[in-house]
Amino acid sequence: MSHDEDHITSTGEKLVRMVNQIAAFFHSRPREEGVAGVAEHINKFWEPRMRRQFFEMLDSGGEDFDELVVVAAARIKRPITPAEADLKLGIKVPPGDLAGAQK
């Protein structure tokens, strides 16, 4: 295995590749079934940290995502942020921590 830096892939690039592979599989299905399949797969098998990163990337442009992924995003559960989780637990959160979380 090479340790060449050119072969290092970022977590974001891996996430884009994975979600686009899911979409490629579902492109063979009727459109509505494909959209539902992408969302269901991500909701079932991706942990909140992965979904959080997915939405951060999507919210900042998401130009690398397959079109089926972009459409399915409306059905994917958006995880709460750590600050929102603290607030639900009754832990006081500085207002700046919540500012970016509420969209």
Image (cartoon, grey):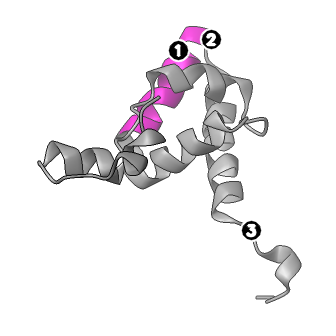
**Residue density around tag 1, few if under 14, some if 14–19, many if 20 or more, within 10 Å:** few
- 92 within the magenta span: no
Closest to the camera, between mark 3 and mark 1, is: 3
Q: Residue at x 88, y 76 (%)?
A: 6
Task: Identify which amino acid the numbered label 1 is placed on.
Answer: Glu
Question: Which label number is shown at residue 31?
Answer: 2
- Left/right placement of residue 87 relative to residue 90 reads right
Closest to the camera, between mark 2 and mark 3, is: 3
Instruction: Compute the Cα span from label 2 to label 3.
Output: 31 Å
What are the residue bounds of the magenta stretch?
31-43
Q: Is residue 27 visible in this depiction of the protein?
A: no
- Left/right placement of residue 63 relative to residue 35 reads right
Q: Is residue 7 visible in this depiction of the protein?
A: yes
Q: Residue at x 21, y 45 (%)?
A: 87
In the rendering, at what x and y percent does residue 49 appear?
43, 54
The quarter holding residue 34 reads top right
- Left/right placement of residue 80 relative to residue 63 reads left
Instruction: Compute the Cα span from label 1 to label 2.
Output: 5 Å
Provide the residue designation for mark 3: 9
In the rendering, at what x and y percent does residue 102 appear?
42, 33
Q: Residue extending furthest front?
A: 95
Secondary structure of residue under mark 3? loop
The quarter holding residue 55 reads top right
Q: Residue at x 29, y 44 (%)?
A: 84
The quarter holding residue 13 reads bottom right
**Residue density around tag 2, few if under 14, some if 14–19, many if 20 or more, within 10 Å:** few
- Of residues 55 and 3, which is closer to you in this image? 55
Marks 3,1: beta carbons within 8 A: no
Instruction: Compute the Cα span from label 3 to label 1.
Output: 31 Å
Instruction: Quadrant for the N terminus, please.
Output: bottom right
Question: Which label number is shown at residue 33?
Answer: 1
